[in-house]
Image: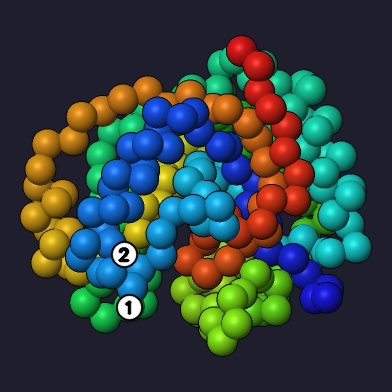
Amino acid sequence: MSDLTAIDILVNPDDNTIRHAQQWNARMRESVPTGFALDATHQPHITTLQLFVRTADLDNVYAAVEQTLAATDVAALSYHAVALRHADWGVPGQGLAVMVIQPSSQVLDFQAALLAAVTPYTDSGGTAAAFVTDPGEQISQSTIDWVDRFVPAQIGADNYIAHITVGFATLQDLERIEAEPFDAFPVHPASVAIYHLGNSGAARAQLKAWPLTP
């Protein structure tokens, strides 16, 4: 077991949002059939924090998240899906597509509170050993760098880009897809969870979860 574990403290969305994500994922796989499918080990989710934490401190991380949730008005955590965009993920000729999610100000407050709570258990310098892998799979440097730089690069109103990853597609197809109208819709959080991360930011293995009740 690695001394560090790459984790995602995330929000699991409602069933309607999952259906949207699966539909987009199907379109991405028409473009790149070898791309990943959203399934039990690639869960659609909204990342709040990605971090390397000390494996020996995982129980402390769980307790810190639970305490933060207890002090949070979870009914005020609201999201809105507003666009389909992509990022360069180091694969020539392809982009990693995401549904862009607009968070409420309370979501940003929640992110800040979580970060303060778990920071004592974090560390830098994680390697591929900190991630979940399939046999023969190599963790991309883009994946490692994203987690290592998430704080401060994705923290706060000016930096945080909330999103749901939906898969790889060719840049040519993405140009066409992104030009299509996007029907915005509300995203309702169903639970907060901690997942062990895999390649391309995939939520591979659930470590802990807390259902949210409105």
Dividing the picture into quadrants, the one containing residue 186 is top left
Disc tally is: 2
Displayed quadrant of residue 107: top right
Residue 146 vertical placement versus 24 (above, below): below
Which structural element holds mark 1?
loop
Q: Which residue is drawn at the image coordinates 51% and 44% (left, top)?
A: 45
Looking at the picture, how far across and down is residue 144, in whole percent?
Answer: 57, 73
Q: Which residue is mark 2?
A: 168
Q: Which mark is residue 213?
A: none
Asked if marks 2 and 1 touch (Cβ < 8 Å), the reply is yes
78 lies left or right of 186: right
Q: In the figure, is residue 112 to the left or right of 101?
A: right
For image coordinates 54% across by 83% down, the residue present is: 138
Q: Is residue 1 visible?
A: yes
Q: What type is the residue that disc 2 sits on?
A: Phe
Residue 95 visible in the displayed image = no
Mark 2 vs mark 1, foreground winner is: 2
In the picture, residue 109 is in which quadrant? top right
Residue that mark 1 sits on? 91
Q: Residue at x 75, y 51 (%)?
A: 207
- Give x and y (percent) for residue 23: 29, 44
- Residue 151, compared with residue 147, is above or below; it is above
Residue 3, given in percent of the width and then of the height, sits at: 83, 73
Question: x, y percentage for residue 13?
Answer: 50, 33
Disc 1 residue crowd, few under 14, some 14–19, many 20+, Cα 10 Å: few
User: Which element is circle 2 on?
Assistant: strand
